[in-house]
Amino acid sequence: MPTVEKICRTDAGLASELRLSVMRLRRRLANERDPHNELSMNAMSVLGCLFRHGELTVGELAACERVQPPSMTRTVNALERGGWITRRPHESDGRQVVVALSDEGRATVVADRRRRDEWLAQRLRELSPDERAALRRAAPILERLATA
């Protein structure tokens, strides 16, 4: 049976190893969410998009999350009912609305991120300096892959 080192020498092997590792890390980070947070991962992702980019239209949010606008409209409606976002008419296009985080939405994102960042920072402290340096170099590359 081939070793992991031999499998990872090919692009297909590396792809398989990265996929598995990233999926496991995502699941582990999801388990570290704020226990008081009742929102789904998809809803939190929408709030995170607004946190990073500021006010967006429903169409821009849909593009950011790679979903169809009708699906995003349903998510936005639920988030607005819960008080996590606000909507206002678009300044120049009456057919559109602009979505923004409410104070509650911003606080929810900050608390959720803080908790997961603390967990990950603790795990990183358990790594060697060389391992942390390798992850610092890999982080921008992983970001490019994720946003491609």
Image (tube, rainbow, N blue to C red):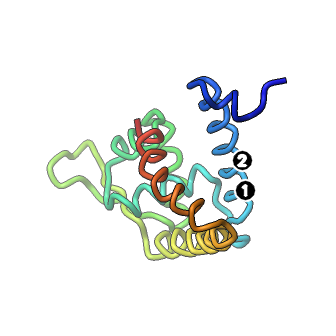
Which amino acid type is marked by label 2? Arg
Is residue 76 visible in the rendered image? The answer is: no
Q: Residue at x 33, y 58 (%)?
A: 53
Q: Residue at x 52, y 44 (%)?
A: 74
Residue 135, x across and y down, in percent: 53, 56
Q: Residue at x 58, y 68 (%)?
A: 129
**Secondary structure beneath disc 2?**
helix
Query: Is 113 above or below relative to 29?
Result: below
Q: Quadrant of the N terminus?
A: top right
Query: Is 48 above or below relative to 8?
Result: below
According to the image, label 2 marks what residue?
24
Of residues 110 and 40, the one nearer the viewer is 110
Residue 100, x across and y down, in percent: 37, 62
Q: Are marks 1 and 2 in contact (CB under 8 Å)?
A: yes
Alpha-carbon span between mark 1 and mark 2? 6 Å
**Secondary structure beneath disc 1?**
helix
According to the image, label 1 marks what residue?
28
Q: Residue at x 68, y 52 (%)?
A: 25
Query: Is 122 above or below relative to 22?
Result: below
Query: Is 35 above or below relative to 12?
Result: below
